[in-house]
Image: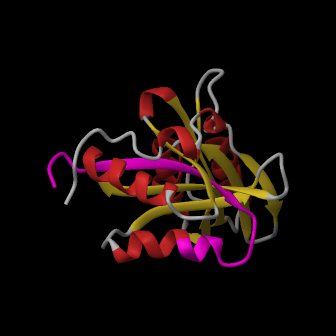
């Protein structure tokens, strides 16, 4: 594989038991590690949206997306390019802050990042931040000096910019759009 990069896929599927397992098994069978996975219902409670990030090249990403489209519970698949999509992640950080001075430092850093303090105790502060990968990695790196007691990340959720939607690329119209032959 040449030119390997992080590829983001948005997938609309039936909101039913076992569907996520089917989708992730496809990646596993092909030998791909899923770098990020986020799943939730859409405006239609019968449909879930899966955002998957995988390290691959563009040709294999197209092949994977076409194989996803063949799965029965899959309604739509869209490859999201970084320059045409919005990508965000939620990170929760519980940081040691036993003294008033340390709490003030943590609060000041959180304010710089436009993060929210969501819990305060005598020994710690819990911070929530929504941002792109650079922002979430930066706050994590800075907060390590205070001792991170616990950390949780949601994984990336992504959506295409502008008026176009994932449903504009339907399974029927795009199932065989590759134009290249693969063995």
Front residue of this view, candidates 28 and 145: 28
Q: Is residue 68 above or below residue 148?
A: above
Q: x and y percent of residue 59 in the render?
A: 26, 47
Circle count: 0
The quarter of the rendered structure image containing the N terminus is bottom left
Residue found at x 48% / y 46% = 133
Looking at the rendering, the stretch of residues picked out in magenta corresponds to 1-22
Residues 54 and 151: in front is 54
Q: Residue at x 48, y 59 (%)?
A: 68
Residue 121 in the image: state x and y as whole percent: 82, 68
- Residue 87's image quarter? top right
Q: Quadrant of the C terminus?
A: bottom left
Residue 131 in percent (x, y) is at 59, 42
Asked whether residue 10 is drawn in magenta, I would say yes
Quadrant in which residue 146 is drawn: bottom right
Which residue lies most toward the top here?
Answer: 162
* Residue 124 colored in magenta in the image: no
């Amino acid at each position: 594989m040449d030119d390997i990069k992080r590829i983001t896929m948005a997938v609309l599927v039936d909101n039913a038991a076992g569907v996520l397992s089917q989708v992730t098994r496809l990646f596993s069978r092909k030998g791909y590690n899923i770098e990020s996975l986020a799943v939730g219902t859409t405006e239609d409670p019968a449909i879930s949206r899966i955002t998957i990030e995988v390290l691959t090249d563009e040709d294999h990403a197209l092949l994977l997306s076409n194989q996803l489209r063949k799965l029965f519970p899959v309604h739509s698949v869209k490859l999201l390019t970084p320059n045409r999509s919005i990508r965000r992640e939620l990170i929760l950080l519980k940081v040691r802050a036993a003294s008033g001075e340390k709490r003030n430092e943590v609060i000041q850093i959180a304010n710089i990042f436009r993060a929210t303090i969501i819990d305060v105790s005598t020994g710690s502060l819990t911070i929530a931040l929504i941002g792109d990968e650079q922002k979430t990695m930066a706050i994590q790196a800075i907060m390590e000096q205070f001792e991170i007691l616990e950390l949780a990340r949601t994984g990336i959720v992504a959506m295409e910019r502008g008026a176009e939607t994932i449903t504009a690329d339907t399974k029927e119209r795009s199932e065989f759009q590759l134009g290249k032959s693969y063995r």
